[in-house]
Amino acid sequence: MSNGLALLSIFVLSVFVGFEVVAKVSTTLHTPLMSGANAIHGIILVGAIAVANNATSNLQLILSILAVVLATINMVGGFVVTDRMLEMFKGKKKEVK
């Protein structure tokens, strides 16, 4: 049971740390931060999948699947934000007459 308690503790602490880190970022820096953090989101997703693979109870499995879903949403959202940000830097296309 101590392994399950350790995994649950890591999950709860990561939620608190993630919330505090994101809450401290100013709105001006949020978009560049999201675009630069896509690699970190991928690592988090791999970690969540590894935890799901090692789950020994239903609670661990449910929490780890929730972590996989949330990490996937976070990573995809980061790519969408990056794509929209890069579209802003492209010049407008001139119409050919």
Image: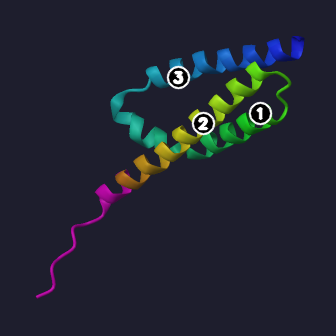
Q: Which residue: 66% across, 15% down?
A: 12
Q: Residue 80's x, y, as percent?
A: 43, 50
Q: Residue 13's x, y, as percent?
A: 66, 15
Lower position in the chain sequence, tag 3 or tag 1: 3
Q: Which amino acid does label 2 sit on?
A: Val
The residue beneath circle 2 is 69
For mark 3, give the secondary structure: helix
* Alpha-carbon span between mark 3 and mark 2: 20 Å
Which corner quadrant holds the N terminus?
top right
Residue 4 vs 75, above or below: the answer is above
Q: Which residue: 52% across, 20% down?
A: 19
Magenta span: 85-97
For mark 1, give the secondary structure: helix
Q: Which residue: 57% across, 33% down?
A: 70
Nearer to us in this view, 40 or 80? 80
Q: What residue type is labelled 1?
A: Ala
Residue 37 makes an appearance in the image: no
* Alpha-carbon span between mark 1 and mark 2: 11 Å
Residue 41 vs 57, above or below: the answer is below
**Classed neighbour count for the residue bearing mark 1: other residues with Cα under 10 Å, few (<14), some (14–19), many (≥20):** some
The residue beneath circle 1 is 52
Q: What residue type is labelled 3?
A: Val
The residue beneath circle 3 is 21
Which corner quadrant holds the C terminus?
bottom left
Lower position in the chain sequence, tag 3 or tag 2: 3
For mark 2, give the secondary structure: helix
Name the mark nearer the viewer: 3 or 1. 1
Rendering quarter of residue 89: bottom left
* Left or right, residue 46 beside residue 93: right
* Tag shown at residue 60: none
Lower position in the chain sequence, tag 1 or tag 2: 1
